[in-house]
Amino acid sequence: MKDIFPLQLTDVGFAPDGVSLLHDVQLRIADGARSVILGANGAGKSVLMRLMHGLLKPSSGSVLWNGNPARPAAQAMVFQRPVMLRRSTLANVEYGLKLLGVPKALRQARAEAALAHVGLAHLAERPARVLSGGEQQRIALARAWALEPRILFLDEPTASLDPSAAREVERIVSDIHQAGATIVMTTHNLGQARRLADEIIFLHQGRITERTPAANFFHQPQSVEAAAYLSGELP
């Protein structure tokens, strides 16, 4: 597989309808790390994630994959509220493989393997929409894992889940990372960030004000904004 790293954002701005949501973002994502994006509500976390994934186009600057502006296939994204198709759990996972062009003969085996990884093999024939929120999020993770992504984007993947379901999602994310995927994730859960992050990217009002190893960020934040966020002074 052709290398897709680094993912490089240079002077990236995003200003729909003239309202600037991101300003002059400089960011380089290399292969293998777990990067967690933190920041107060409205800081631009989800916008930044969507720009990296390719769902949005920057108003200024560039987003390049190993020097190439073309969005690679070897990536996936999981959202806070997964969209389930009106079909079985297995068919939901297979659908992503179909869109990727995986031959029909291989789709079922890869989908079954992904469901086994997330502990849902026993629900393969159940309609996905009747399952719990935690189970649906695990289906979304299986759908992403089946694509064999080099990088997985996760936008608040546990925000609407109870603690037990959230910890199961964390376990799966760790397993996907162990399988070789780079992880880029947003969360408001500081405990989750401590458990999962190798590094923290901190956003404040559309600007990256700090990027540092996770242990450094939580013990000695370097920016005034980050310190305020950690102390609860920023929502």
Image (spheres, grey):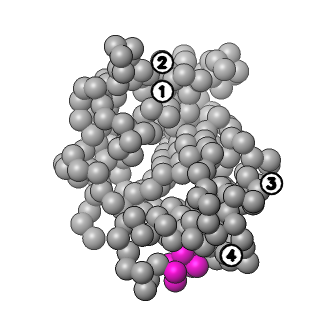
Q: Residue at x 30, y 31 (%)?
A: 58
Point out residue 195 in the picture as x, y percentages from the top left corner: 65, 49
Tell me the number on the disc at residue 125. Answer: 4
Helix, strand or loop for the magenta stretch, by majority: helix
Which one is nearer the viewer's eye here, 105 or 194? 105
Q: Residue at x 45, y 56 (%)?
A: 76
Magenta residue span: 108-114
Q: Quadrant of residue 148?
A: bottom left
The residue that mark 3 highlights is 164
Mark 4, Cα crowd under 10 Å, few <14 / some 14-19 / many 20+, is few
Tell me if residue 148 can be seen: no
Which one is nearer the viewer's eye here, 75 or 235? 75
Q: Quadrant of the C terminus?
A: top right
Marks 4/3: CA distance?
Answer: 24 Å
Point out residue 34 in the picture as x, y percentages from the top left corner: 50, 51
Q: Earlier in the sequence, mark 4 or mark 3?
A: 4
